[in-house]
Image (tube, rainbow, N blue to C red):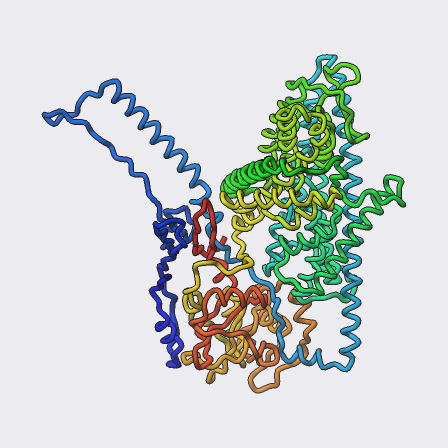
């Protein structure tokens, strides 16, 4: 059972109507008990770390300590009978050296293991992240708008408006995907053709330094330009953007995520990243780009760069919950355009991105994904001269793999591949986390990040060149892609270097070669070296200050070691060599799916995406099993890559389910108390002081007697910080003897809400500080309230299901005694690693 230093009786005392303010929350130690796996009991403790402990632990915040057996090193001194130390013999000296080396190795391994755990980059929630207002404010202005005589006509037009915007989201995402794909393919083909020409020429003439310098120079120049574009225009465009999109759809406000600057940096950055030779893909950035298109179309206006002017497109939607639904459609459209998988894109939006779903939203999201897939297919087919064939439904197509069948005897091999994918995927996440921590600690300046991106691009090009020169692997197999660029080097006539179709191609072309090139195109030595090299390059690349995705690198790594499994099967069963040699692509596909599942930890959407990409539903069962096993194995070691990025950023994300082992935690344990209240008729000076000195974004409104707040009164409503800023900006106040102006409308709140007003930007004179502001027409008169004994799981479901931003805690007399926000719930995190459940209460930090 769970115990608490603060009992239910204490909570009941807090609920008494004695008017006493609650000055601080109790600092508690709450023991937790896990379900024992054996007869031994395992106890878990959640603690809130003090300031001294916080400094000793690298400012990492509250850390949950799991009971375990610590190794105690004892120094044993051998004494003579007279009490003096004895001279050790050879055996003793050997044992002492062994013990010393063992102790040093334990210390080193412990430092490596605790490198990420003792930093401030994962064990905290950053306080700057605010929540979106998904809850509708039903004040007087809202009801005036709903009581208009033409409300039925407006509702019908709004319904049509929804579907028109969703339609254009799909079309514009398809146009963007096709344009990026064609541009990348054209420029990349010219780049690799130039490198191939110099490779073949200089190999015979002894000037191999020329292709090496050309390769490195192109990579460094293009990558540095792309990194500078991202970092100096909009840093939020770095990476795939999916962790940030997922957090936004969960209810977090992330300013700048869906701006025109971010769109330019994202699209231009991903083109330059791929042309720069980095181990990345454009599929993740396509999902983010689709979200930016969706947000811009939904709002009906776009803020122009380098100014405050906005380009008006149409009378769009301004409510956060409506924008959220369109962004979900944009994410699905981006994935659908990337893989030609409308159902998979819809499920990806459900499983990995969106936190709020409904039946009507499902139809609109699927419609947008289908439009995106169809128009991408049409545009690419038109580009290839077959507009009636419609043979290019997505940017990345696995295409039909011949002999894609399986027998029950192959399932043990598939199970082993699932385990391998989970292990390699977990290693990818762990290594990238260590690298991310290093970057956040020591590489904070933008120019340093640009230089790092250039170094990675240079190393990528030089490593590829070194493998070309050092590995003498020739093959006479015809590549699957008829437009593939091949280099001969030292190969005889009618043969080419086997690394040509891997390194002289975009990451998508490399994936197609590994999936479709015939047996014998790549030797086991070549594949083994390629897997190791590309794995570390992909780990190093993800997290750079460039626009890049992790889908394609993970698929390439998995396809490479999947072919190794296929080669092993061919050698293990020489009697069926010809049969298994023809099915080499099947094992590459299984390896690609396993690797991607081990990195991202998604199952349903990836299964559907891969099945739609291959066009073979009968092979869905082994793909699903492999994805499940790789996810389970990966979860046993670490979290998924996107979840790791969210934790490093300190985003207060609320998962699908409430934290386990927290049933006895009450609202009185979590709330911020005392509640900072405002009067329904408040002085301008006090409102300005509150907005300047307090970081809260919502305030309970009470009917205080005069301006005396020493005695609590019943809660009358809730008003947001953004509403108060708009009222101050429009000067909706007056002297107490005059009637307050009532010129503000609901449209004003929506328009100014998008401008991110700050109290420092609003000028209030000394005379105006004595004016009074009537908040009654603008507050939400029926806020959600709970009692002090409300349990954490019920609080969590209330926040998660309704998309709340604030929750007022009241006593039995309906007097506000505290406030609960998203961060108060998100700081409780439950992790299951290596078979143990760990409960953490994180620290809320400023950065």
- Residue displayed at 70% across by 47% down: 609
Above or below: residue 374 compared with residue 501 = below
**Location of the N terminus (image quadrant):** bottom left
Residue at the top extreme? 205
Residue at the bottom extreme? 737
Above or below: residue 522 compared with residue 271 = above
Tell me if 43 is positioned left or right of 372 in this view.
Answer: left
Q: Residue 458: in sight, yes or no?
A: no
The picture quadrant where one finds residue 272 is top right
Give the number of marks: 0
The picture quadrant where one finds residue 534 is top right
Above or below: residue 834 compared with residue 77 = below
Residue 368 spot, x, y in % from top left: 76, 56
Residue 139 spot, x, y in % from top left: 62, 78
Residue at the left extreme? 82
Q: Residue 529: in sight, yes or no?
A: yes
Who is closer to the viewer here, 80 or 808? 80
Who is closer to the viewer here, 600 or 267? 600
Tell me if 58 is positioned left or right of 514 in this view.
Answer: left
Residue 754 spot, x, y in % from top left: 66, 63
Tell me if 769 is positioned left or right of 199 in this view.
Answer: left
Residue 436 spot, x, y in % from top left: 53, 42
- Residue displayed at 68% across by 57% down: 328
């Amino acid at each position: 059972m769970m115990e608490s230093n603060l009992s239910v009786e204490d909570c009941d005392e807090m609920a008494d109507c004695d008017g006493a303010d609650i000055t601080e929350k109790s600092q508690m130690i709450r023991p937790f008990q896990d379900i024992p796996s054996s007869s031994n009991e395992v106890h878990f403790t959640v603690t809130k770390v003090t300031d001294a402990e916080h400094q000793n632990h690298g400012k990492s915040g509250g850390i949950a300590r799991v009971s375990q057996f610590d190794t105690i090193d004892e120094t044993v001194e051998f004494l003579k009978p007279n009490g003096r130390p004895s001279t050790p013999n050879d055996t003793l000296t050997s044992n002492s050296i062994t013990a010393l080396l063992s102790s040093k190795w334990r210390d080193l391994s412990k430092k490596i293991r605790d490198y990420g755990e003792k930093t401030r980059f994962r064990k905290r929630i950053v306080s700057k992240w605010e929540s979106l207002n998904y809850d509708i404010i039903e004040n007087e202005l809202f009801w005036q708008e709903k009581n208009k005589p033409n409300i039925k006509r407006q509702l019908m037009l709004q319904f049509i408006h929804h579907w028109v915007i969703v339609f254009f989201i799909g079309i514009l995402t398809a146009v963007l995907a096709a344009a990026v794909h064609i541009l990348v393919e054209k420029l990349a083909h010219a780049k690799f053709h130039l490198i191939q020409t110099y490779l073949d020429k200089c190999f015979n003439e002894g000037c191999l330094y020329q292709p090496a310098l050309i390769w490195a120079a192109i990579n460094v120049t293009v990558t540095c330009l792309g990194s500078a574009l991202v970092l100096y225009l909009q840093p939020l465009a770095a990476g795939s953007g999916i962790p940030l999109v997922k957090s936004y759809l969960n209810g977090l406000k992330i300013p700048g995520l869906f701006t025109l600057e971010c769109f330019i940096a994202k699209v231009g950055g991903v083109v330059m990243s791929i042309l720069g030779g980095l181990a990345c893909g454009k599929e993740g950035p396509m999902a983010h780009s689709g979200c930016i298109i969706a947000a811009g179309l939904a709002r009906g206006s776009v803020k122009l760069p380098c100014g405050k002017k906005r380009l008006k497109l149409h009378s769009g939607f301004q409510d956060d919950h409506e924008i959220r639904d369109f962004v979900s459609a944009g994410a699905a459209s981006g994935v659908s355009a990337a893989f030609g998988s409308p159902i998979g894109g819809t499920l990806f939006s459900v499983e990995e991105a969106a936190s709020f779903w409904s039946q009507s939203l499902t139809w609109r999201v699927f419609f947008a994904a289908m439009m995106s897939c169809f128009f991408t297919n049409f545009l690419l087919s038109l580009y290839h001269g077959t507009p009636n064939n419609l043979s290019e439904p997505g940017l990345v197509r696995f295409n039909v793999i011949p002999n894609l069948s399986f027998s029950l005897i192959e399932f043990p091999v598939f199970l082993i591949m699932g385990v391998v994918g989970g292990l390699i995927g977990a290693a990818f996440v762990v290594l990238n986390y260590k690298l991310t921590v290093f970057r956040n600690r020591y590489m904070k300046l933008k120019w340093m990040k640009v230089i790092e991106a250039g170094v990675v691009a240079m190393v990528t090009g030089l490593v590829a060149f070194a493998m070309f020169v050092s590995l003498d692997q020739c093959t006479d197999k015809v590549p699957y892609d008829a437009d593939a660029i091949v280099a001969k080097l030292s190969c005889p006539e009618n043969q080419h270097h086997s690394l040509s179709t891997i390194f002289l191609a975009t990451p998508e072309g490399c994936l197609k070669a590994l999936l479709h090139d015939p047996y014998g195109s790549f030797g086991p030595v070549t594949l083994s070296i390629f897997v190791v090299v590309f794995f570390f390059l992909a780990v190093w690349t993800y997290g750079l200050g460039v626009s890049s995705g992790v889908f394609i690198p993970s698929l390439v790594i998995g396809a490479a070691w999947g072919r190794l499994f296929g080669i092993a099967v061919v050698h293990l069963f020489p009697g069926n060599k010809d049969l298994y040699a023809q099915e080499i692509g099947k094992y590459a596909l299984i390896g690609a799916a396993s690797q991607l599942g081990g990195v991202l930890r998604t199952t349903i959407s990836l299964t559907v995406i891969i099945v739609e990409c291959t066009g073979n539903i009968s092979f869905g069962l082994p793909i699903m099993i492999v994805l499940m096993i790789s996810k389970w194995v990966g979860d046993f070691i670490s979290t998924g890559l996107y979840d790791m990025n969210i934790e490093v950023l300190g985003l207060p994300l609320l998962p699908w389910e409430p934290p386990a082992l927290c049933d006895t935690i009450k609202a009185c344990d979590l709330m911020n108390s005392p509640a900072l209240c405002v009067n329904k008729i408040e002085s301008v000076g006090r409102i300005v002081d509150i907005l300047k000195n307090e970081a809260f974004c919502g305030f309970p409104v009470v009917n205080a007697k005069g301006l005396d707040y020493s005695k609590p009164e019943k809660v009358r409503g809730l008003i947001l910080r953004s509403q108060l800023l708009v009222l101050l900006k429009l000067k909706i106040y007056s002297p107490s003897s005059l009637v307050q102006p009532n010129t503000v409308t609901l449209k004003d709140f929506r328009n100014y809400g998008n401008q991110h007003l700050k109290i420092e930007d609003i000028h209030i004179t000394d005379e105006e500080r004595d004016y009074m502001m009537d908040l009654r027409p603008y507050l939400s008169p029926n806020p959600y309230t709970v009692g002090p004994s409300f349990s954490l799981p019920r609080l969590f479901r209330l926040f998660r299901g309704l998309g709340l931003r604030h929750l007022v805690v009241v006593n039995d007399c309906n007097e506000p005694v505290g406030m609960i926000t998203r961060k108060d719930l998100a700081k409780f995190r439950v992790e299951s690693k290596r078979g143990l459940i760990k409960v953490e209460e994180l620290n809320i930090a400023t950065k």
